[in-house]
């Protein structure tokens, strides 16, 4: 028993998708950087056989199966813990804020933020799940991970008894940002060439992301001499957003499709600035990624973003649009003075490497599984590209 690999079951629904996003990136890197050494045996479980499974090469066992009873979270609350027990997992990791109340093996959850508890939709079923079942599951968990000191503060404000088991593990930034070098090749997003200078906005249609604030800051500060590239807006929201843009400016606003991790570093680097006017984030990875490539990141010190005030950050008042527009104008005026990474900002961003994120996560595992000694799991295995797994298997009663 002591000589076999650590066996970890994971709720891998964030990998069961056509494109990896924030939470999925974290799990992907955790699996990729620990599976190669052979010290961890992963069992990845997801619930949608119709969608691709984005898992690293050599990830271990991958099982995708549906369970009736979506309204009652049957897959998460029953099938997932049962699967963890049947594969004799040493540990079950639920990386996406939700977790099962029934925990037949030691369980860890990553609670990214308290946004779900800041919203109400009037559904009795959802309210019970969010307000009663999940907090009860957290209190049963062997350990809890969160991604910033601000999220830790928000979690403890709601559930003070979780303090002894709560650990902060910030997200990581990909090495491609930390190692990116400037180039002069054309920037093409989708099939559209992008004319410089341009500004990047990151966020979706949620009101707290403040897309309209970014649009107005660009509009008033430099729409006559730059382009705005909007990243992260879901395709079904594109048409409504376009209606809010003055007709004479519509050709200067680019609504980006999903952008791969291979393309993003140079798109960040060639931007004049990143507009990130969000009002609340559990972490705020675009603020770090921008600084890692040497591009100014404009945001307000709200929530966890106050922790990301590095050398490449421009912190502005949350409610002063004139200051935002003036800052955009000044950056467009000064853009020729900057080309290439800011060495000091990049050094600051390296504290958020994926290796650091994985090492801290393994330390939390070690607090639950004592036989996982420091250094027992290498995080320096070879890099692999995504590989789609399409495992179709039905749950049996």
Image (cartoon, grey):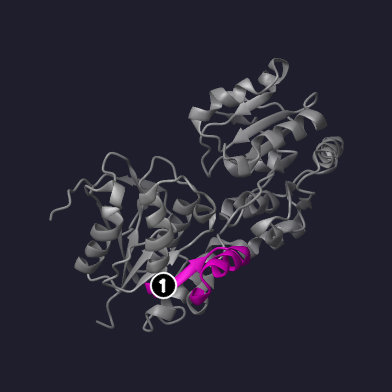
Q: Is residue 215 visible?
A: yes
Q: Is residue 38 above or below residue 346?
A: below
Choose top left, top right, bottom left or bottom right for residue 197.
top right
Which percent across, then down, holds residue 28? 43, 55
Which percent across, then down, holds residue 272? 75, 38
Q: Is residue 160 above or below residue 173?
A: below
**Position of the C terminus by quadrant:** bottom left
* Front position in the image: 278 or 382: 278
Choose top left, top right, bottom left or bottom right for residue 101.
bottom left
Magenta segment, which residues?
Answer: 140-162
Which percent across, then down, holds residue 89? 27, 70
**Residue placed under numbered mark 1 in the picture:** 139
Residue at position x 59%, y 23% from top?
A: 192
Q: Is residue 141 visible?
A: no
Q: Main secondary structure of the magenta part?
A: helix
* Front position in the image: 46 or 338: 46
Q: Specify whether 348 is left or right of 359.
A: right
Q: Residue furthest top?
A: 247
Q: Specify whether 298 is left or right of 230.
A: right
Q: Is residue 142 magenta?
A: yes
């Amino acid at each position: 028993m002591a000589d076999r690999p650590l066996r970890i079951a994971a709720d891998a629904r964030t990998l069961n998708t056509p494109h990896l996003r924030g939470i999925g990136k974290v799990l992907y890197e955790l699996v990729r950087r620990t599976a190669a050494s052979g010290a961890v045996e992963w069992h990845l479980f997801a619930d949608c056989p119709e969608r691709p499974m984005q898992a690293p090469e050599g990830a271990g066992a991958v099982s995708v199966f549906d369970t009736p009873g979506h309204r009652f979270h049957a897959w998460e609350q029953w099938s997932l813990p049962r699967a963890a027990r049947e594969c004799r997992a040493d540990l079950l990791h639920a990386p996406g804020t939700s977790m099962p109340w029934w925990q037949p093996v030691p369980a860890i959850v990553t609670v990214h933020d308290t946004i779900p508890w800041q919203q109400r939709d009037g559904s009795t079923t959802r309210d019970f799940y969010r307000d009663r079942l999940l907090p009860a599951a957290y209190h049963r968990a062997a350990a809890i991970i969160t991604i910033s000191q601000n999220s830790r503060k928000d979690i403890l404000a709601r559930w003070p008894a979780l303090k002894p088991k709560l650990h902060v593990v910030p997200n990581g930034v990909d090495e491609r940002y930390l190692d990116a070098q400037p180039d002069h090749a054309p920037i093409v997003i989708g099939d559209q060439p992008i004319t410089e200078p341009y500004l990047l906005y990151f966020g979706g249609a949620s009101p707290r992301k403040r897309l309209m604030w970014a649009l107005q800051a660009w509009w008033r500060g430099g729409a006559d001499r730059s382009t705005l590239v909007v990243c992260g807006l879901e395709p079904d929201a594109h048409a409504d957003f376009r209606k809010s843009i003055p007709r004479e400016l519509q050709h200067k606003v680019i609504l980006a499709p999903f952008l791969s991790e291979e393309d993003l570093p140079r798109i960040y680097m060639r931007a004049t600035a990143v507009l990130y006017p969000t009002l609340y984030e559990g972490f705020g990875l675009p603020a770090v990624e921008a600084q890692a490539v040497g591009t100014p990141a404009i945001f307000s010190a709200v929530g966890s973003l106050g922790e990301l005030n590095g050398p490449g950050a421009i912190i502005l008042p949350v409610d002063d649009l004139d200051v935002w527009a003036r800052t955009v104008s000044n950056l467009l005026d000064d853009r020729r003075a900057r080309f290439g990474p800011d060495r000091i900002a990049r050094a600051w961003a390296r504290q958020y490497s994926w290796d650091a994120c994985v090492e801290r996560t393994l330390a939390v595992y070690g607090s639950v599984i004592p036989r996982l000694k420091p250094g027992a799991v290498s995080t320096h295995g070879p890099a692999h590209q995504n590989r789609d797994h399409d495992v179709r298997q039905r749950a049996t009663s």
